[in-house]
Image (tube, rainbow, N blue to C red):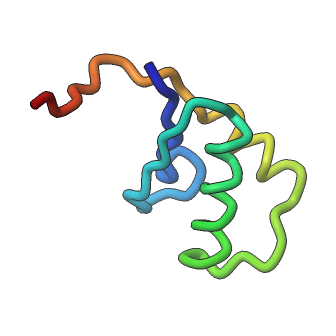
Amino acid sequence: MGRVLKCSDVHLGCKFEVRGETEEEILRQHAEHAKKEHKLTEIRPEDWESARKAIREEVGRKTATR
């Protein structure tokens, strides 16, 4: 089971979600999103910490089977 970070947990009104297996992977993708979509030129240490704290274990997500 993976982990998820919902941007709305750190930036109200944004529906972006990132999934991954590691905290580093999720934070990297979230930082790319924040720079591109929210026009952040730098991510402050407190922003990294807020994002890190918002990462949750993903529960009950169904995956497609063939």
Q: Residue 5, how many percent across, how many down?
A: 53, 41
Q: Residue at x 21, y 26 (%)?
A: 62
Vertical placement of residue 62 versus 50, above or below: above
Q: Residue at x 79, y 48 (%)?
A: 48
Q: Residue 35, how many percent across, how many down?
A: 67, 74
Q: Residue at x 70, y 53 (%)?
A: 28
Q: Residue 25, how many percent across, how many down?
A: 66, 44
Relative placement, left or right, of 7 versus 40 is left
The quadrant of the image that shows the C terminus is: top left
Which of the pair 58/48 is nearer the observer?
A: 58
Vertical placement of residue 48 versus 44, above or below: above
Tell me which corner region of the image, top left, top right, bottom left or bottom right, holds residue 49. Answer: top right
Q: In the displayed orientation, state which residue is furthest to the front.
A: 66
Tell me which corner region of the image, top left, top right, bottom left or bottom right, holds residue 38. Answer: bottom right
Relative placement, left or right, of 7 versus 29 is left
Total number of numbered discs in the rendering: 0
Vertical placement of residue 40 versus 66, above or below: below
Q: Residue 17, how many percent across, how many down?
A: 44, 50
Which of the pair 64/31 is nearer the observer?
A: 64
Q: Residue at x 49, y 48 (%)?
A: 18
The quadrant of the image that shows the N terminus is: top left
